[in-house]
Image (spheres, rainbow, N blue to C red):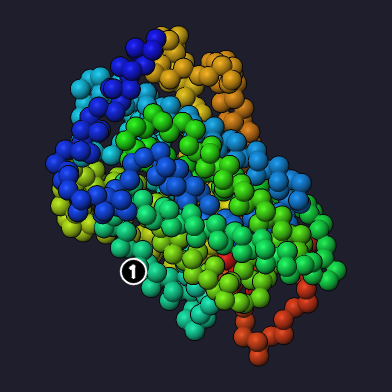
Amino acid sequence: MASSDKVVETVIVGNYVEMETEGKPKGMKSKIPNLFWHGGSVYDAWFSCASNQVAQVLLTLPYSFSQLGMLSGILFQLFYGLMGSWTAYLISILYVEYRTRKEREKVDFRNHVIQWFEVLDGLLGKHWRNVGLAFNCTFLLFGSVIQLIACASNIYYINDNLDKRTWTYIFGACCATTVFIPSFHNYRIWSFLGLIMTTYTAWYLTVASLLHGQVEGVKHSGPTKLVLYFTGATNILYTFGGHAVTVEIMHAMWKPQKFKAIYLIATLYVLTLTLPVAAAVYWAFGDMLLDHSNAFSLLPRTPFRDMAVILMLIHQFITFGFACTPLYFVWEKAIGMHECKSLCKRAAARLPVVVPIWFLAIIFPFFGPINSTVGSLLVSFTVYIIPALAHIFTFRSATARENAVEQPSKYFGRWVGTYTINVSVVVWVLIVGFGFGGWASMTNFIHQIDTFGLFTKCYQCPPPASAVSPPPHGHNATAAAPLHHPFNHTRRP
């Protein structure tokens, strides 16, 4: 058995190591750029997963706690964190299975990035490929839109001389520069910096809230309404559903079969950030968060807060690249440019992908509602239901299970336990995430369109101080429509 494992590892890694080392200069001059630019280790994958998972969600998890209550908020984070890690594990198993089969057939992946829809195509056929491609691309498209909206919303906290639509134009041009980043190999330094930025922001919010203390007359009344409860639950479902780029991150590894536990370890680190932030801010401000979905809006402006806003802006640029790079790959393959070795030609070919993202960010600037909607309608299928079903159908026959490259661990109950977990994931997410979450998020999204209209110039911007006096604390704190409150600012990506 040990010798067969070694053969499998050679098959999986062989061509890829060859692809990465072929033609690579050996001198010291190449080592310094590669230190910052060319990643493929287990650590690079961990930084990419953790950095991609924890972003603007830090700013909206306290808001979700105000909808769910402290106990439900903590339990949902732990539960969805484990569920997200499980489906990321399933995706990694299916990737290794697909790649092993193809490389045994002498398929060469030199200059080709394997993507999730190709894994589904190779293992289950074109119908699965088409469904996976549709859900994955739509999710990543709107994920990129959300990053762009978030940039405009956050910069407004430290510079409101321009409206949010104008900031969207500006940051759209800035984010378009991600077309020059070839692949996930080249996010080494960005992933590292991104995680440092969100770690700073998380601990700033936690410490600042504790030092601020509880506001006078603070109330913690959640949960109060079903629509708010399931909106908050869907936000957390989205929080731990950032593994739509798992296959691309794995493909950027020197030894992708080592990915299996990386997402779980990344999730455990993310929980050390998200749980203290959500608990501390909710403890300090309570029901006021129902009217303030972005935690920045409740803390006084200080140099530390401005630093946190700026760091989150930079991280949004990085997260935009994470979400958009797989779309670049799909587009390159569609127009026959994916294997082109000219970086400039590939960058020019990628630019049309940014245009619809830019346009959609202008049409639907509803940052909070669009997050919940994407979470319930797209994330639920893309990274929870489809991977679980794909694993079930890939190994439905006794022959497939016997010849599987990766056998389920005894800790999961082997095949019976794995199938039981997969079915449980599908049923839970279909009912709670897609069903109740879809109802709650669509109700809210339609309400935003009715209230603000499309192409709104400055969504949820506070009115001028001279025009309106600020409402008292806790005003409308338990109303069913806090999301359209004039002081309710940006939510997470």
Which x, y percent locates residue 464? 62, 85
What is the residue that sits farthest to the bottom in this orientation? Answer: 466
Which x, y percent locates residue 57? 57, 55
- The image quarter in which residue 257 lies: top left
- The image quarter in which residue 80 lies: top right
Which x, y percent locates residue 4? 34, 12
Q: Is residue 141 above or below residue 259?
A: below
Q: Nearer the viewer, residue 95 or 163?
A: 95
Residue visible at 77% across and 67% down in the picture: 213
Judge left or right: residue 222 versus residue 142.
right
Judge left or right: residue 38 versus residue 292.
left
Amino acid under disc 1: Ala
Observer able to see residue 435: no
Residue visible at 63% across and 33% down in the picture: 428
Observer able to see residue 425: yes
Q: Is residue 476 above or below residue 33?
A: below
Read off the residue under disc 1. 173
Q: Nearer the viewer, residue 250 or 140?
A: 250
Which x, y percent locates residue 485? 67, 70
> How many numbered circles are shown?
1
Mark 1 closeness class: few <14, some 14–19, many ≥20 residues within 10 Å = some
Q: Is residue 402 above or below residue 72?
A: above
Give the SS element for disc 1.
Answer: helix
